[in-house]
């Protein structure tokens, strides 16, 4: 998400986070968070909900319909 010229949120979307794609999804959002200097990122899913802390950064796994509420 962008406000004026500054990136304020890192958002990634996948149907579900599984043991097969978890590493890829988390590494992808972490790279974006690091690049833009963010401490929080979102992975939007169909129905999963979780919170993961990696390297001091918070990743919120949230159903897409709940995002923003």
Image (cartoon, rainbow, N blue to C red):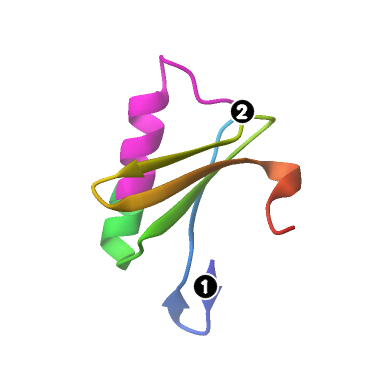
Tell me the residue at 45%/82% (across/down): 5
Magenta portion: prevailing SS class: helix
Q: Nearer the viewer, residue 51 or 38?
A: 51
Q: Closer to the camera, 35 or 18?
A: 18
Q: Residue at x 40, y 50 (%)?
A: 58
Residue placed furthest toward the left: 55
User: Is residue 30 positioned above or below 33 on the image?
Assistant: above
Tell whether position 27 is magenta: yes
Secondary structure under tag 2 reads loop
Q: Residue at x 74, y 58 (%)?
A: 69
Judge whether residue 43 is colored magenta.
no
The spot of residue 29 in percent (x, y) is: 38, 46
Above or below, 22 relative to 52? above
Residue topped by disc 2: 15
User: In the rendered view, does 14 fall on the left or right side of 28?
Assistant: right
Q: Residues within 10 Å of mark 2 (few under 14, many from 20)?
A: few
* Residue sitting nearer the eye, 63 or 35: 63
- Residue sitting at the far bottom: 4
* Residue tagged 1: 2
Residue 50 at what x, y percent from top left?
53, 36
Is residue 49 left or right of 28 when viewed as pictured? right
Residue 23 point in image, percent of width and height: 33, 27
Q: Residues within 10 Å of mark 1 (few under 14, many from 20)?
A: few
Residue 31 numbered mark, or none: none
- Upstream in the sequence, badge 2 or badge 1? 1
Q: Does dot 1 land on a helix, a strand or a loop? A: strand
**Total count of labels:** 2
Which region of the structure is painted magenta? Answer: 16-30
Point out residue 16 in the picture as x, y percentages from the top left corner.
Answer: 57, 25
Kindly indicate the quadrant of the structure image that contains residue 27: top left
Callout 2 touching callout 1 (CB < 8 Å): no
Q: Quadrant of residue 46?
A: top right
């Amino acid at each position: 998400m962008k406000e004026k010229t500054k990136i304020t949120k890192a958002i990634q979307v996948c149907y579900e986070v599984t043991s097969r794609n978890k590493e890829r999804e988390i590494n992808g959002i972490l790279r974006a968070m690091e690049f833009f200097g963010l401490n929080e990122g979102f992975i939007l899913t169909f129905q999963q909900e979780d919170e993961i802390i990696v390297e001091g950064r918070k990743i919120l796994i949230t159903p897409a319909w709940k995002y923003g509420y």
